Image (cartoon, rainbow, N blue to C red):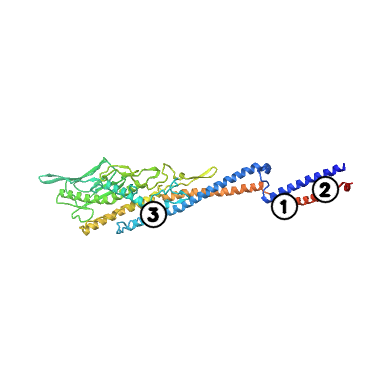
Amino acid sequence: MAIESIGTSRSYLTMQLVELKGRLTEKTGQLATGKVSSTYGGLGDNRLLDLELNQKVSRISSYQETITQVNLHIKTMNVTLDRLEDLRLDAKGALDLNDFDLQNDGQTRTQATAEVLLHEAISLLNTEVAGYYLYGGTDAYENPVADVDAIMDGADGKAGIRTVVNEYISANLGADKLGRLTIPPEVTNLTAGVPTDSTITITEDGAHDFGFKLTSATSTLTNVNITQPTGAIPDALAIEFTGQPNAGETITIEMTLPPSHSKPVKIELKADTTGEEDGTFVIGADLAETSTNLRAAILEKVQEQSNTSLKAAAAAWAGDQFFDTFNGATPMRVDGPPFETATALTSGASTTVEWYTGENTATTNARTDKKARIDDTLSVNYGARANEKGLSDVMKALATFMSADFSTDMPTTATKEEKLAQERIDKLYYGELVDRLRTAIVPANADQSGIVDIATEISIAFRTVQDTDNRHTQMKSTYNTTIDEIEGVDKELLAVEILQLQTNLEASYRASSIVFNLNLADYL
């Protein structure tokens, strides 16, 4: 019986030693890892909550990686949009109505400035970040905007803006530079060799949108009957002299400019005895001579308006057709040659340089071209296309201005007066063109430009990303705190427990040593 008791005590002590050693090993491992357990099973009832929280933290980390990339894209876009807005303002300054300074190469000094601005604008619109072209919509493989040379002069057999502008100018001015109007010699009726009436007719040359369109004529001229335009296609007006007018009396002819034919142009002429003053016609010896003089004055003024206001309208129209390609719109060319007698436009999709080659499918919002998921239920859109209005307006104004040719080949026999007269026409054309192009880049009835509108939308996306990132950071911190509470250990308390276990283990070893060293003689 005594022998059996000794064996039982030894077995019990051995079990205690093994248990204490196991607990010490466990506690030492916890102290080393800082974790309660190396498996979820060791977390007890909190294991499901811990697993869920770890999944949420992992998901947030994935969203934060996306946010890091989005932030890089949007910050770069903000920088480039700010500079593009500065370029728009610089372009406005370059399009100076009062700075007609023609250089030896046939360009004005302001055109040289516009070329520098156009190069920078293209560089900004071709900005790429880690393979993503910021202004190419979803396109991420190549520059979305062609280079300056291709845009201006064409490439690969396709026409550039200069060619397109020249075609539109030819189609609008017509062969005789009268804006597609026909003004034949006046018809005079005689009785016994004495003129009884003389009629001047002005007629549109066909049914098309090119050139001037007649709208009305008003007159204070005595002995003159006017047949007003009726709105027919093509339209006409007639001026009939039945006698002589008086000096100082006037006639005004109103026309409109393409393509919308909403902007009016007026030609006002005053009857005069000398005709030395600009904008006058001479009262002749009889009504037939006066009619001839008025026709000559009308021809001169129509030709002047053709080479100034109409030419500028044609160039701006060409710029619109070349650059306004948003939503997959097709650039339209004049259906020619011959261009001087053209009556329609035709698709230039296969014959004209594509200045923008990025994403160009139909959309109501280019921002949706680039979408990033930054939370379980939240995405941000920050796509942009270089041919959006605002961005394309700057390109259009600069390139169309650069395409203008203000140099005129005058014959060597031209007189000083003829050269001065041509210089005056060139300056008027410059002013008309600059005025139209400034309108394209300076918002009409708007508080801000199209570029600022885009920048505002991008900034809203950036604010959303920043707020979401801050929320992710806060939630991730909260989740990690809870995870640490579940998985972690109190190292100070653990150290005390380990010390206590070491003390108990040493005591158990001592007790075991005494028991294990007992023999039967000692026991008895």
Which residue corresponds to mark 2?
A: 516
Q: Residue 431: which quarter of the image?
A: bottom left
Residue at horizontal 79 percent and vertical 50 percent from the top: 509
Tag 3's secondary structure? Answer: helix
Percent position of residue 227, x then y: 22, 43
For label 2, the SS is helix
Of labels 3 and 2, earlier in sequence is: 3
Q: Nearer the viewer, mark 2 or mark 1?
A: 2
Q: Looking at numbered disc 2 in the image, what kind of residue is underneath it?
A: Phe
Tell whether label 1 touches label 2 (CB within 8 Å): no
Question: Label 3 is placed on what type of residue?
Answer: His
Circle on res. 211:
none
Asked if disc 3 and disc 1 are in contact, CB closer than 8 Å, the reply is: no
Dot 3: within a 10 Å radius of its alpha carbon, few (fewer than 14), some, or many (20 or more) residues?
A: some
Q: Relative to residue 140, is residue 216 drawn left or right?
A: left
Give residue 184's quadrant in the image.
Answer: top left
Q: How many marks?
A: 3
Residue type at mark 1: give it. Answer: Ala
Q: Earlier in the sequence, mark 3 or mark 1?
A: 3
* Residue that badge 3 annotates: 119
Residue wearing tag 1 = 495
x, y percent for residue 426: 28, 55
> Mark 1 or mark 2, which is nearer the start of the sequence?
1
Indicate the quadrant containing the N terminus: top left, top right, bottom left or bottom right: top right
Q: Residue furthest top?
A: 232
Dot 2 alpha-carbon crowd within 10 angstroms: few under 14, some 14 to 19, many 20 or more: some
Asked if residue 89 shows in the view, the reply is yes
Point out residue 468 in the picture as x, y percentages from the top left corner: 54, 47
Measure the C-alpha gap from mark 2 to mark 1: 31 Å
Q: Crowdedness of circle 1 by 10 Å Cα count: few (<14), some, many (20+)?
A: some
Label 1: which secondary element: helix
